[in-house]
Image: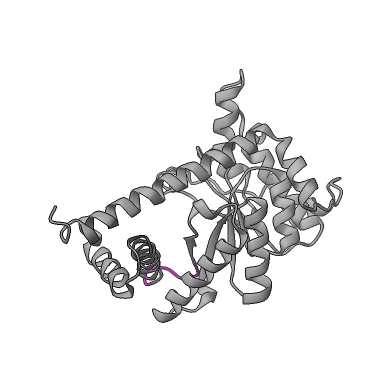
Amino acid sequence: MPAYQELVDDAVAYGKKLGGSEEEQIKNACDKLFVLFGAEILKRIPGRVSTEVDARLSFDKEGMIQRARRLIDLYKEAGIGKDRILIKLSSTWEGIQAGKVLEAEYGIHCNMTLLFSFAQAVACAEAGVTLISPFVGRILDWYVANGDKKTYEPSEDPGVKSVTKIYNYYKKFGYKTIVMGASFRNTGEIKALTGCDYLTISPKLLAELSKEHVKLTPTLSIKEAQACDLEKIHLDEKAFRWHHNEDQMAVEKLSDGIRKFAADAIKLETMLKERMFSAENGK
C-alpha cells in the first residue's frame, strides 16, 4: 500500500499509543485506518462515506453498536460530523436491530449491506435505517451458477426484480429508507433500475454508459409503486428468520458475504500486526 503509507503509519502509531494487549492495539489501529481512509474520501466528495463494522460481529448486536459508536467518535476527533457517515452493517437480524438502536438512540445513520432477501428489506424498513444496499449482481451470479439459465434480459434479471420489488414496497407504504442498488454486472441492470433512489456504479460501467448517448426514462416511479399489488407485512424475529431461510439464494449469499468480509478483515489485521510488532520481535 505504498500510496497510503502515511495513513497506515498514522494508524499503527495510534494503536500503539493507546496500548493494551496486542489484539486491542491491532483493533484500534484498524478502526483508525478505516476512519483515516474515510476522511480522505470526504475531502474529495460531497455527501457521505460508508465505514464498515467488522463482519465478525454480524451476529453480535451489542458488539456492533459499540464498534459503530467508536467509529463515529473517531470521526468526531478528526473533525467530521456523524451526518457525513454511514455505518455499514451486515443485514442479519442482529445487524438490523443494531441499526435500529443506532438510528433511534444515537442519531447514527446506517447502511445495511449484504441484503439479498425481501425479508431483510422489510426488517430494515421497519427498523428505520437510513439506507439499504441490495446486491443486484451477486443475486444474478447465484442464479446463473445454480440454474440452467445463463443469460437474462434486464427486466427478467433476478437482481433487478428483487430491487424493483423492494423499491415498490418501500414507496407504496411510505418508508423513508433509501434503496441503493449495488454490485452491477452490466449496464442493462442499471438501465432497468433507473428511477431507484440511488445506484452505486463502477467506473467501468459508467464509462460504458457514457458512450451510449441515449436518454433514459425512469423504469421505477413512486406513482407506479403506489399502484402495485404488494401487501404490507410485519416481521418479528421468528418470522424474519423463517422467511429469510426460505430464500436459499439469500441464505447462501449472506453467509458467503460475511465470510469473505471477515477474511478481508483478518488480512488487514495480519498486515498491521506485522508492521506493529515484527520489528520489536526482532523479525
Quarter placement of the N terminus: bottom left
Q: Nearer the viewer, residue 126 or 194?
A: 126
Specify the segment rendered in magenta: 43-48
The residue under the point 59% across, 23% down is 146
Q: Is residue 269 visible?
A: yes
The residue under the point 60% across, 52% down is 59
Image location (x, y in percent) of residue 123: 73, 54
Quarter of the image for residue 174 reads bottom right
The residue under the point 16% across, 61% down is 280
Image location (x, y in percent) of residue 101: 66, 68
- Furthest toward the left, the residue is 282
Per the image, is 47 magenta? yes
Q: Nearer the viewer, residue 224 or 101?
A: 101
- Most prominent secondary structure in the magenta stretch? loop
Q: Is residue 203 visible?
A: no
Per the image, is 193 magenta? no
